[in-house]
Amino acid sequence: MKVKMLIAAAAISITGVLATSAMGASLTPTKVTIQAQSGGDFFGYVKSSDKNHCANGRKVILYKLQGDSPHPSADQKIASDTASANGDGYMWSTGNTGQRHGKFDARVKKTEFCAADLSPVVKAQP
């Protein structure tokens, strides 16, 4: 009976350690950049050390700020694009959004392997 109790206790301990290790696994850092061009065009790059999971094919969402700083639940979604290889980077581009006034940022959401990121804020270029 004591042996069974020891085995059960060891199994529970090992399971707890494994669960804690999995939960503590950090996500790969990701960076999204943004630039505004005249006429309401926006583009940028997604950068990460894990290019296959965190940069190439990553969905980028362009938001128009409704206040002075980013506020995810209040900001207006304007466009999205998927980052793809362009030279030595992974570029996204919205094309002409028609947005010539206001402040904007780009965001990538957290994925299974990759951290989320929020670009710096830029002003639209008329």
Image (tube, rainbow, N blue to C red):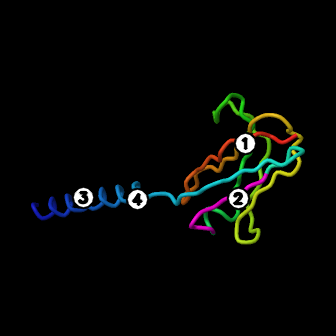
Q: Within the image, what quadrant is residue 12 found in?
A: bottom left
Asked if the magenta segment contains residue 44, the reply would be yes
Magenta stretch, main secondary structure, is: strand
Q: In terms of sequence position, does the residue under pointer 4 or pointer 2 come before the other? A: 4
- Viewed as shown, does residue 31 lie left or right of 14? right
Along the viewing direction, whichever of 7 and 51 lies nearer the viewer: 51
Distance (Cα) linking label 1 and label 3: 50 Å
Q: Nearer the viewer, mark 1 or mark 3?
A: 1
Pointer 2 local density, CA inside 10 Å: few below 14, some 14–19, many at least 20: many
Give the answer, above or below, for where 76 lies relative to 1. Answer: above
Pointer 3 local density, CA inside 10 Å: few below 14, some 14–19, many at least 20: few
Distance (Cα) linking label 1 and label 2: 14 Å
Distance (Cα) linking label 4 and label 2: 30 Å
Q: Which residue is mark 1?
A: 122
Distance (Cα) linking label 3 and label 2: 44 Å
Q: Residue at x 74, y 34 (%)?
A: 76
Q: Which residue is mark 2?
A: 45
Q: Position of residue 1 (x, y in %)?
A: 11, 61
